[in-house]
Image (cartoon, rainbow, N blue to C red):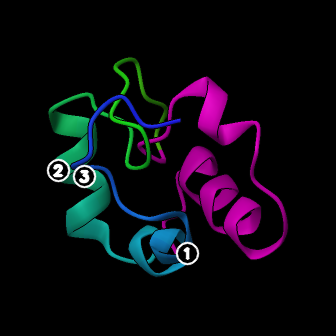
């Protein structure tokens, strides 16, 4: 579910999580990369979108949460 069509497509998430500038920009404006909801974590994802991650996306987001950006 997207609240705002400016969010990235899900198939672009892994690529975007490797881009420090895009993640930091989304964190700065407090808007989820995928759905644009507020209250994002260090990976610039809201709790709802973060809970749907698996595989490579989850590994990349976990790196951000540990403070070791990919």
Query: In the rendered view, does 42 fall on the left or right side of 60?
Result: left
Q: Position of residue 14 (x, y in %)?
A: 55, 75
Q: Position of residue 41 (x, y in %)?
A: 49, 32
- Of 15 and 69, nearer the camera is 15
Q: Which mark is residue 1?
A: none
Q: Which residue is mark 1?
A: 11
Q: Is residue 60 above or below residue 51?
A: below
Element on which disc 1 rests: helix
Q: Which residue is mark 2?
A: 25
- Of 69 and 51, nearer the camera is 51
CB atoms of marks 1 and 2 within 8 Å: no
The number of discs equals 3
- Quarter where residue 62 is shown: bottom right
Q: Which residue is mark 3?
A: 24
- In magenta, the rendered stretch is 43-70
Element on which disc 2 rests: helix
CB atoms of marks 2 and 3 within 8 Å: yes
C-alpha span from label 1 to label 3: 19 Å
Which of marks 3 and 1 precedes in the sequence? 1
Q: Position of residue 22 (x, y in %)?
A: 24, 63
- Of 31 and 70, nearer the camera is 31
């Amino acid at each position: 579910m997207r609240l705002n069509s400016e969010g990235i497509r899900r198939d672009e998430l892994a690529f975007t999580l490797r881009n420090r500038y895009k993640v930091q920009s989304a964190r700065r404006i407090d808007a989820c990369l995928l759905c644009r909801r507020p209250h994002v974590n260090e990976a610039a994802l809201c709790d709802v979108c973060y809970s749907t991650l698996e595989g490579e996306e989850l590994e990349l987001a976990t790196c951000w949460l540990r403070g070791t950006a990919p």
